[in-house]
Image (cartoon, coloured by chain):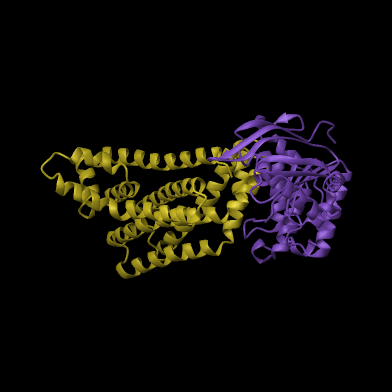
Amino acid sequence: MHLMHPIRISNLHKAFGPVDVLNGVDLTFHPSETTAIVGPNGAGKTSLIKCILGLTHADRGTIDVLGRSIRDGVAYRDHIGYMPQQAHFPENLTGRQMVRMVRLLRELDDIDHALVRTLHLDAEMDKPFRVLSGGTRQKISALLAFMVRPSILILDEPTAGLDPVSSAALKDHIAERRAEGASVVLTSHVLADLEELADRVVFLLDGRICFDGALDDLRQMTGERRLERAIATLLEGEAA
Amino acid sequence: MTLTTSALRIFRFQFQDALSSRWLLVHTLIYLLIAEGLLMSTGFTDKALVSLINVVLLLVPLVALLFGVIHQYNNRDYTIWMLTQPLERPGLFSGLYLGLTVPMVLSFSIGITLPFLWHGGLIAVQSLKLLTLLGLGSILTFSGAGVASSLAIRFSDRVRGIGLALVIWLVYALLFDGLILMGILIFGNWPVEKALIGVMLLNPIDLARLILLQTFDAAAMLGYTGAVFSRFFGSSTGMVIATTALLFWVATPVWVAGRLFQKQDF
């Protein structure tokens, strides 16, 4: 596992037209840590993740992944597993073909198949995506993100659409990967998931970081036990 | 991994997806029925092939533009997911573009060729003409899909992208000749023919028609713009210029789409 910071973001700015969606974000993600990025709609969560993934080009600022600027090339994405909020894959391909594709594109000899069993995907891997349920597609999306054993996991609403058993299994797997040293970046509207998984909360509002600290610190600061209440209190404080 | 390797690997899976596509099967069947219908009604005559040309020149760009743009909007989330993989954007764009166009070209070619095969019509002279038709249909597909890619990348609003694709098709397939004719009527007393030649280079469908009808030695059936072109350049010079212009019509939209893909925020 790499000793340097998995992700270090400095003074990140991004605007779409007149709207500043990221306004001087400084953030460092650490190994063996699960960071929840929270905030209201339009706060800049998605833009931040898109900048890290190279989907969106930042106007100013730097992003280093494992000590190298993401502007130096795409090799940094070898270390990232990404699970989008909604999985869309070619309708006529199967899960097994997608696994083969990721292996080929990442030039991997060996991959982690643990999630296939854990998420009960054995019987679904040879069916085309067009016949799979949203939940099963989401499970395959999780498999594709985890199977490359990345040191950074970026998970956008990972449990959305999953049944309780699969959701629990996925959360166990996230915790396992974190314990093995991965840095997990998580967004979710299911705050119970964040409470269960996150060590640290980054609260974004209008493209700025309003809070960055341990979950317990947030609770202590707001005087609220539950994350939902704590975030609401934080939001009210910012609005005032 | 080199750009070519990644493009080919992406293409391989796109192609596998296309092989099971019901839409593509329907696409093949439509061309097959059209070709079969024309061959059955008129036999292996140049008239059948010229009729086929007219259908192909209208249908191929429409399908390439519309299917191209719709396919890319439908696969936008998948494209975004692919962009999170360790792939350079030019390689990814090339793989996705070829994965879109090659199955369309094959589908069109199979649909047109099969009736010729089972009616025993692939004798030497007809084969050359058929190959020219397939080649130009393929070029129009590559060109149309390039324009479709540019639209789908540039405009995140699906309705706008599809609407523009339709407008572009209407202009090039239907309105262009009308506008040229109107220009001739208005400026009839001026020596506008040389200017018209330049204007005609702006329409890949007319260029394809010109090449096809010259191949078929059917100048009498040329559209007005094609007739002017043919008269000025003669067959060989005109052919070289038209072919070069057509290739430019493939390269330019694809290059523009590639540049947009490289710079676009997804």
| For residue A225, above or below residue B234 | below
- Residue B195 in sight from this viewpoint: yes
Percent across and percent down for residue B204 are 35, 46
Hey, which residue is sitting farthest front in the picture? A240
Q: Residue at x 41, y 52 (%)?
A: B164
Near-viewer residue (A58 or B62): A58
For this view, does A92 lie left or right of residue B64? Answer: right
Percent across and percent down for residue A99 are 72, 52
Q: Residue at x 42, y 64 (%)?
A: B115
- Residue A119 in sight from this viewpoint: no
Colour of chain A in the rendered structure image: purple
- Report the label total: 0
For this view, does A226 lie left or right of residue B261? Answer: right
Near-viewer residue (A52 or B54): A52
State the image quarter where residue A69 is shown. Answer: top right
Percent across and percent down for residue B64 are 44, 54
Colour of chain B in the rendered structure image: yellow
For this view, does B65 lie left or right of residue A213? Answer: left
Percent across and percent down for residue A22 are 64, 39
Q: Residue at x 84, y 55 (%)?
A: A226
